[in-house]
Image: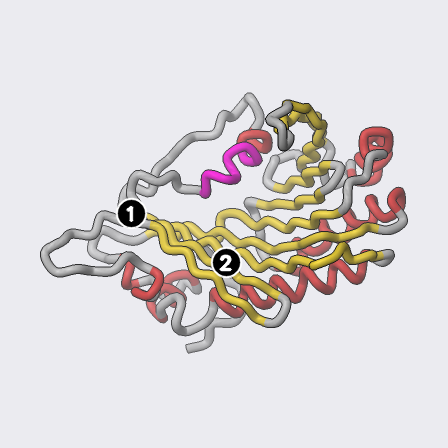
């Protein structure tokens, strides 16, 4: 069947793009100008204090800034060594890439160049099933917990790493009913995005949903000295394409799943 095109009932709940680079100590001095150039898309700004522990267990505090759209569905998270763009209202990559373009443009205007250490595109899907259905109706059994005679499967987490050239693809499938309905490693990010007026709710999968977490990564053995935002945009696009090809592969999700997501059922 045809698996291309926009999925009207897509299971995608979060999209994240990350670029890590050698620390830029001037971020705190330039953040007001950076935010001013991005206010049209992210008018809200919060400064966040993050505790870090060094090799001798010495505690230090660093600053980070969260820039948010008015409805808080789009965010730009800035640290001295990372740009992270995320969305809970993703429709297509070309639209998401417009935000990446603007965020990178704001950084390059002040930084002039970036020594990139790694970058990634991550897609988190929450796949819901109906009462009469099973996870196998939506996703390959190869990504689900093994079935053993005499034992009832409650759930679990599978982690598979793939390599393709200089790209690593990390795929997690989470079905444990007691697990949260979003990955625990983004709780802090989601909490900051929600804000105090709408605290994050800790909904569980409850055996009715699973998470498919696809992370396409590129790590440089030595920092890549980049002077052009277009270079980074092209590499992020390539990572997106590899993650997208995996998600739409016939051996990952079923035809039934795509019929549901395309609105044909």
Quarter where residue 190 is shown: top right
Real-space CA distance between mark 2 and mark 1, rounded to the nearest whole angstrom: 24 Å
Q: Is residue 126 above or below residue 202?
A: below
Query: Can residue 185 be found in the magenta stretch?
Result: yes
Expressed as whole percent of the image width and height from the top left, the position of residue 21 reads 74, 47
Could one spot residue 140 in this view of the protein? yes
The answer to whether 46 is drawn above or below residue 132 in the figure is: above
Where are the magenta residues, as a range? 183-190
Q: Nearer the viewer, mark 2 or mark 1?
A: 2
Res 170 label: 2
Task: Answer yes or no: is residue 210 visible.
Answer: no
Left or right: 182 in relation to 23? left
User: In the image as oriented, which residue stretches furthest toward the bottom?
Assistant: 1
- Residue drawn at (31%, 59%), measured in percent from left and top? 144
Q: Position of residue 131 (x, y in %)?
A: 22, 51
Could you tell me which residue is drawn at 75 percent across and 53 percent down?
116
Task: Determine the residue positioned at 57% across, 35% down.
Answer: 189
- Image quadrant for the N terminus? bottom left
Mark 2 lies on a secondary structure that is strand
Question: How was the colour assigned to the protein in this rendering?
Answer: secondary structure
Report the residue marked by disc 1. Answer: 208
């Amino acid at each position: 069947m045809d698996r291309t095109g926009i999925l009207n009932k897509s299971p995608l709940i979060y999209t994240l793009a990350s670029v890590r680079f050698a620390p830029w100590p001037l971020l705190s001095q330039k953040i007001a100008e950076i935010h001013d150039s991005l206010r049209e898309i992210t008018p809200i700004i919060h400064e966040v204090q993050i505790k870090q522990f060094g090799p001798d267990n010495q505690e230090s505090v660093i600053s980070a800034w969260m820039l948010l759209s008015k409805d808080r569905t789009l965010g730009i998270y800035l640290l001295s060594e990372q740009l992270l763009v995320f969305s809970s209202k993703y429709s297509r990559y070309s639209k998401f890439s417009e935000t990446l373009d603007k965020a990178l443009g704001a950084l390059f205007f002040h930084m002039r160049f970036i020594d990139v250490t790694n970058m990634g595109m991550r897609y988190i899907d929450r796949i819901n099933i109906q009462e009469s259905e099973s996870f196998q109706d939506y996703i390959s059994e190869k990504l689900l917990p093994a079935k053993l005679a005499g034992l009832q499967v409650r759930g679990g987490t599978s982690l598979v790493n793939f390599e393709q050239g200089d790209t690593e693809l990390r795929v997690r499938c989470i079905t444990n009913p007691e697990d949260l309905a979003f990955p625990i490693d983004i709780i802090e990010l989601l909490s900051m995005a929600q804000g105090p007026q709408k605290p994050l709710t800790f909904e569980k999968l409850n055996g009715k949903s699973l998470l498919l977490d696809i992370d396409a990564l590129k790590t440089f053995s030595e920092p890549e000295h980049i002077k052009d935002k277009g270079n980074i945009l092209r590499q992020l696009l390539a990572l997106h394409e590899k993650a997208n090809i995996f998600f739409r592969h016939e051996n990952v999700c079923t035809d039934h799943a795509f019929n549901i997501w395309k609105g044909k059922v």
